[in-house]
Structure formats: structure tokens, C-alpha cells
Amino acid sequence: MRKKNPQRLQEIAAAALACFSESGYTRTQMADVARAARVSAGTLYLYADSKESLLHLAVMEALGGKAAMQPVPFKSEGLPAILLLIETEVTSAARWPRLQKALETGENPAPSLLQDIGLELYDLLVSARAIIRLLDKLKLDIPEIDRAFATLIRGRYLAETARLLSAAPQAPPPEMCRLMARMGMEIIAWAAMHRRRESAIHQFGELSEEEIRQAAAASFAAALLPDMPGTPTTAPG
């Protein structure tokens, strides 16, 4: 085994993460990663033996930079191993104790509770934004990752938030609760993750990160309130 260069392997993993997050799996080629990492194609193969191995490294990098600790050349054990890594790491990180406590105790989804839950989701998305952005792009090309994304992250949170709304007095029908939950999640996702990718002209430079966080949580709570003005209380006919 060649002597590994942890810094070079980490640079390749970071380049792979950037490429797959931007272009997805199908459109990204090994040459793209080599170019992004500023290495030759021959050097790239000394560190990762295939495109699938680069994907595995990208997932590890998104999950906390563990790629640099891998042997060289890195050889992935395939998509099942990548899915297992995602399931193990994301399941351990995907925790929303305030929401889960509210479900366990049967709390009424009052504005203050919903704002606390919005803050909790915001903080989770900020900390996990690299892996979420990667999975969001990969799911368009890889059905197994699409299913994992739906069940481990978005779908699970969506179901639990909708369940909280459904327990409220005069709650909308279940599908309307799911719709409201999804719209609330998109508010938080934009504020916590997507706005950071926009150019400087679209930024809110006079606002602090905490002000944006609080505003996002307040908007999340407003979107989820069952008695919000204009929110239908029955499913469309």
C-alpha cells in the first residue's frame, strides 16, 4: 500500500463533495473531481479507484471529514455500504427533542412551542447542511438515496410535525397538516441553508445570523398555525 497523504485525500474528498453536490452523480465524472482537486487523473486513481469510491469519500466528507482517515487507494464496498453509512450517521444526528417531547406529552401546538421547534430545526439544518445538500442532489440520480432521504430526514420530520398539528383542536385534515408542515420546513431550509448559496446582492448583510434564525422560526410558527388567517380548515373540494 502506498504511503497516504491525508491532506491530499481530504482535498480530493472535498472536491468530490463539491462536484456531486453541484452536478449530481450522473453528470459528475472523475475528470471533474480531478480538475476541482487540482490533481491529474493518474494521481486521482492513486487515492480513489472508482467514481463510486469518490462518492463514498464525498459522503464521509459531508458527514464530518472522516475521509482523510481512510486507506489509499480508497475502495468503496458499493452503494449498500454508502447507504449504511448514511443511515447510521444521519439517524444518530437527526434528533429534534423539543418536537418529540411535545408529541410524547400531547402539547397543544401553540405559537411559542412551534417557534421553539423551528429554532431546533434551523440549528439541525445548519449543522447538517453539507450532507443534506449532497443527498438532495444525489436523490435525483439514485433511487435508493431518494428513499433514504425521504425516510431518514425530510419524511420523518414531516410526519412528526404533521402529527403534532393533527392533534390540535380544530386541526385541518391530515393531508393539509402535511402540506403546512412541508411549507414550514421549506421556510427553515431556505433560511438555514439555501440563502447561503445566493450571491452577495441577495444577502441580508445588516441582519445578524441570530436575527435571521429568530425570524425564520417565527415564520415557521406562523406557517404551521392551524388558525392562521387564510388557512383552510377543510380539504379542497
Image: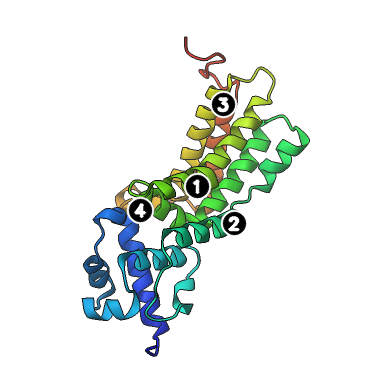
Q: Residue flagged by tag 1: what amino acid is it? A: Ile
* 103 with respect to 86 (left or right): right
Q: Quadrant of residue 18?
A: bottom left
User: What residue is at 63 percent from the left and 28 percent from the top?
Assistant: 165
Which residue, given by chain and number where applicable, does mark 3 sit on? Answer: 177
Residue 116 visible (yes or no): yes
> Which quadrant holds residue 167?
top right
Kindly report the distance in space between the C-alpha atoms of the residues bearing marks 4 and 1: 15 Å
Q: Hey, which quadrant is residue 158 in on the image?
A: top right
SS for callout 1: helix
The residue beneath circle 4 is 197
Q: Which residue is mark 2?
A: 93
Disc 2 marks a residue whose amino acid type is: Ala
Give the Cα distance between marks 3 and 1. 25 Å
Residues marked 3 and 4 touching at CB (< 8 Å)? no
Q: Mark 4, mark 1: which one is toward the viewer?
A: 4
Q: Which mark is residue 212?
A: 1
In the image: residue 146, left or right of residue 181: left
